[in-house]
Image: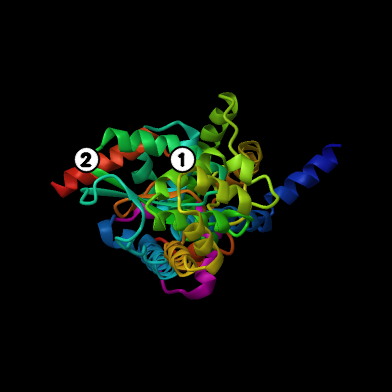
Amino acid sequence: MRYGEGKMGRASSRKHSRHEETAATAAPVRGGRSWFRRFGLQWLAAVVVIGLAVGLVLWLRPLPPKVVIPSARPFRGPAAAAVVITEFSDFQCPSCRAVEPTIKEVLAAYPTQVKLVYVNYPLPMHQFAEKAAVAALCANEQGKFWDYHDRLFEHQTEWAAGGDVRPIFDGYAGELGLDHARFDACVADGRMLPELRADIARGTALKIDGTPTLYVNERRVAVGAAAADITAMIDEALRAAS
Amino acid sequence: MTAIARRALTLLLHPAVAVAARVILGGVFAVSGTVKLIEPVENFMAAIHAYDLLPVWMERPLAVTLPWVEMGSGVLLVLGLLTRASVMIVALQLAVFTVALGSTLLRGISLEDCGCFGALGFKESNTVAFVRNLVLLALAARLGMERAPSWALDRWLQRPPL
């Protein structure tokens, strides 16, 4: 049977495929051409379909936005470090507290080459996270951000338990020797809110779906990464920079 | 009893069953691949990391490529294009995933989320995913028996031999 006999011919070809296989092997082989006749259209269609699917995915996929962190964010380490770790974090989130030792370990391994930038990303499900972020920013106003940051994480279970956090946060400010009146005024008048909103907007733009989310320069660190995974990324970034 | 078994067998061998199996299996792969592709690759890297099977340097290359393979083979399978090849590729992936899931069960690693569907919203534990994969493997086996798939683009595109 030949190609072009129409639907009937094709339909019957299926029924008698066994006969035809023997007929085909008996017939002179015409190499690639006959192969293309048999399977070429399928491959062509497959390539087109895959192409369309890839196009759809690329169209749906958000372009990975650049991590742009203004210099005014609180940071730890040398100001002109070659590698920047950006941490999007929430003071009330248990995993953010859990990641603290890992970050400290990493920073201790690169005292001159890496700086850590902290960006607030309080999650709506954490009732006091926003208040804690404001308090930390108010401490930042008096140059004590990291002390306050450490205190918030160390005592997370105390203030996150519920109740009124205001006196607790005030207490931390007192313990750290902050100017009480200035701290209280800062918390009360909401002057840190625009800064906090800007932080959150940065995280939202990066489609952060949880905290903590860490970046080594512009590369996102996988969730649950160990210190060794992060140092591997830092080494790579240092190699790229040199 | 034999009559019932025979009826069940003829029912199972009905082409419609194969078409359904193809659409389900292909759909699962197409969706899971696409979902992983449109979210940050680090999420899937973390999922791979949780299995604790591969060296860390392999996590990124795998997380970047595997979802494309999943999506591509899934789409081809649903449409019935290069059906036999896509059945084999899908079955191979399924087998690997099932072995990986099985190994986490044996080693007592409990995964909250198997990472199968990215951030689609439902998180399957490794136990659930393992059982689900066995079902999918059965579907793949049924498809492996199919010589000329019905309702497949292959059927329309393949020309009779000269």
- Asked if residue A10 is among those painted magenta in the image, a careful observer would answer yes
Taking depth in this image into account, of A28 and B17 the one nearest to the observer is B17
Depicted B118 relative to depicted B53: above or below = below
- The crowd level at tag 2 (other Cα within 10 Å; few <14, some 14-19, many 20+) is some
In the image, taking residue B18 as reference, residue A97 lies left or right, namely left
Main secondary-structure element of the magenta-colored stretch? helix
Identify the residue under disc 2: A112
Taking depth in this image into account, of A128 and A217 the one nearest to the observer is A128
- Read off the chain for label 2: A
Secondary structure beneath disc 2? loop
Q: In this view of the protein, can residue A239 be seen by the observer? A: yes
Taking depth in this image into account, of A120 and A223 the one nearest to the observer is A120
- Asked if residue B86 is among those painted magenta in the image, a careful observer would answer no
Taking depth in this image into account, of A193 and A207 the one nearest to the observer is A193
Picture coordinates of residue A6, whole percent (x, y): 48, 75
Quadrant where the C terminus of chain B sits is bottom left
Tell me the magenta residue range. A1-28
User: Amino acid type of disc 2?
Assistant: Thr
Q: CA distance from mark 1 to mark 2?
A: 32 Å
- The crowd level at tag 1 (other Cα within 10 Å; few <14, some 14-19, many 20+) is many
